[in-house]
Image (cartoon, helix red, strand yellow):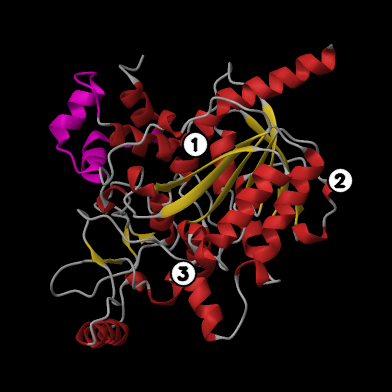
Amino acid sequence: MYQNEFSALRAQAGISLDDLAERLGYSPRQVRRWDKGEGAPREAALAYLRSTVGTPAQPDQAHFNFVDMFAGIGGLRMGFDAIGGHCVFTSEWNKFAQQTYAANFRDNHPLDGDITKIDAEDVPDHDVLVAGFPCQPFSIAGVSKKNSLGRLHGFACEAQGTLFFDVARILKEKRPAAFLLENVKNLQSHDKGNTFAVIMKTLREELGYHVWAKVIDAKHFVPQHRERIVIVGFRDDVPFTWDDLDLPEKGSLKLGSILHPGKGKEKPEGHYTLGDDATVNPKYTLTPKLWAYLQNYAAKHKAAGNGFGFGLVTKDDVARTLSARYYKDGSEILVFQGNRKNPRRLTPRECARLMGYPDTFRIPVSDTQSYKQFGNSVAVPVFREVARIMLPHIAALVEGAKLRKAA
């Protein structure tokens, strides 16, 4: 019988007390006290353990169906799986993301591709629509790139900007009880706020949903500064409030909590870690040529008064935002390895941990593809928490619909 939630989660994760203390940045003595039930553990420590093992659905949780659009590798889905949801439809066009998704989720429905080629009536009926619609046209980096190439962006970008309207046409056809949409923070300010205004007007006035939006920083749950806008909507008026969010103190978790500990404290995994000690593969250490280039590049921009440069971090730091370009040089998050050693990139497994994926999450693709996938992903614990506060309202609307149907 376990003493408390902390000890139960630690046992389920299979992490020793000393290893956990090193990952969390607390003293072994403090971690042992929590494991014995002496004093309340820090919420950040509990959040780390929950993200490591996942939060299984409880038997008394309401069951509902949901669809996963622009699914990526399933980060949003994991939040709704955790509260008892059943995924009945998945759409993701990228073939490499499809491989990772299929390796981690065993479904009795096919993994559909391009949502623009799927008729709304062919999407199964569902209670909740979940979608991380493509954000490149709205992100600062994406807009800058398109401007430099002389291309249109936002809703004028036919390739991606109008994909929000594929969400809208399915909401209009299927009328689910609720939805959750995710995008970059810059969505609010794109085109002087017009893009966001159109989205909110569509959801509220044209589709008649009650809508709430909030920017949440994943730094509450993982050692990474990552701000994303979350848009939640319900078909009927419900007493939803963002005040119900349980957000641990920002920065409580440090980078050491996701780094490979070495010293034989975890089993070696593939080519990420090697030998009985499970030390990080030297391939992730920057070559002298690349490290010199990044230092010279940073010095040049610093002299010009610009803020461009690499992000060198230690186990006691919080990382910058992991991006899809990380595979190029890893410059935004470089791990310090000592004064006489070149820094290294994160391994794909460390990237997975940085995004809140458990170590049971399979990574079947190349390093290049995995860096892109985790850089494009959501931070899983953020959306597990948002799904948690949505659940009572989803359950009420689903139960109400059942009663009306029975009557």
The answer to whether residue 72 is seen in the rendering is no
- Tell me the distance, in whole angstroms, between the alpha carbons under discs 1 and 3: 25 Å
| 118 relative to 26 in the view: left or right | right
Q: Earlier in the sequence, mark 1 or mark 3?
A: 3
Q: Can you tell which quarter of the image residue 280 is in?
A: bottom left
Q: Is residue 173 inside the magenta stretch?
A: no
Residue bearing the label numbered 2 = 121
**Mark 3 surroundings within 10 Å by alpha-carbon count, few (fewer than 14), some (14 through 19), many (20 or more):** some
Residue 241 in percent (x, y) is at: 48, 30
Residue 240 in percent (x, y) is at: 53, 29
The answer to whether residue 136 is seen in the rendering is yes
Q: Which numbered tag is attached to residue 186?
A: none
Regarding mark 2 in the picture, which secondary structure is present there?
Answer: helix
Magenta range is: 13-41
Q: Is residue 21 inside the magenta stretch?
A: yes
Q: Can you tell which quarter of the image residue 30 is in?
A: top left
- Tell me the distance, in whole angstroms, between the alpha carbons under discs 2 and 1: 28 Å
* Eye-nearest disc, 1 or 3: 3
Image point (63%, 64%), residue name: 96
Regarding mark 3 in the picture, which secondary structure is present there?
Answer: helix
Badge 3 amino acid? Ile
Residue bearing the label numbered 1 = 386
Q: Say which of 148 and 15 sits in front.
A: 148
Image point (30%, 32%), residue name: 43
Residue bearing the label numbered 3 = 140
Badge 2 amino acid? Glu
- Tell me the distance, in whole angstroms, between the alpha carbons under discs 2 and 3: 35 Å
- Work out whether 66 lies above or below 149: above
- Work out whether 235 lies above or below 121: above
Image point (44%, 65%), residue name: 323
- Work out whether 77 lies above or below 275: above
Q: Are marks 1 and 3 in contact (CB under 8 Å)?
A: no
